[in-house]
Image (cartoon, grey):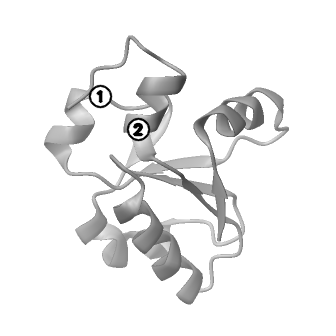
């Protein structure tokens, strides 16, 4: 698993040919409160039952509030054979602090 800073993710999203899956693994209330545009919401506890619907070869950026749950999900996905996992270091909290100050924080 690779780790990416919010600034590097912003640059990557602006320049990549094929957009990665932005996988938000937070709870529903957290996702409803704030999230990145184009992110797909699958709460952490639903990942095991959702794996078959996910492309194991697609680049996946795993996102949570502070980067801890997303790191755990990233490791789990790698154990399940996913090849290209990226964890957003610092999560959406770091994104809101350094990239998008208009994003709601909690």
Which numbered disc, 2 or 1, marks the residue closer to the eye? 2
- Secondary structure under badge 1? loop
47, 65: nearer the viewer = 65
Q: In the picture, which quadrant includes the C terminus? A: top left
- Secondary structure under badge 2? helix
Q: In which quadrant of the rendered view does residue 72 lie?
A: bottom left
Return the disc, 2 or 1, that comes first in the chain's sequence: 1
- Residue ID at (53%, 51%): 89
- Residue ID at (46%, 47%): 90
Given contact means CB atoms under 8 Å apart, are the residues at marks 2 and 1 in contact? yes
Q: In which quadrant of the rendered view does residue 105 lie?
A: top left
Q: Which percent across, then down, holds residue 15?
A: 83, 31
94, 80: nearer the viewer = 94
Crowd class of label 1 (few under 14; some 14 to 19; many from 20; radius 10 Å): some
Position above or below: 97 against 56: above
- Residue ID at (85%, 38%): 17
Please state if 29 lies on the left or on the right of 104 as rendered: left
Q: Which percent across, then down, holds residue 20?
A: 66, 47
Report the residue marked by disc 2.
92
Report the residue marked by disc 1.
34
């Amino acid at each position: 698993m690779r780790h990416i800073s919010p600034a590097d993710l912003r640059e990557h999203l602006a320049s990549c040919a094929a957009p990665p899956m932005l996988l938000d693994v937070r709870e529903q209330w957290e996702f409803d409160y704030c999230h990145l545009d184009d992110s797909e919401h699958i709460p952490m506890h639903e990942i095991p039952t959702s794996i078959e619907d996910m492309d194991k070869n697609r680049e996946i950026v795993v996102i949570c509030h502070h980067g801890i749950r997303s790191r755990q999900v990233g490791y789990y996905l790698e154990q399940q054979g996913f090849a290209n996992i990226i964890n957003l270091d610092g999560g959406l909290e770091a994104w809101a602090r350094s990239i998008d100050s208009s994003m709601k924080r909690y």
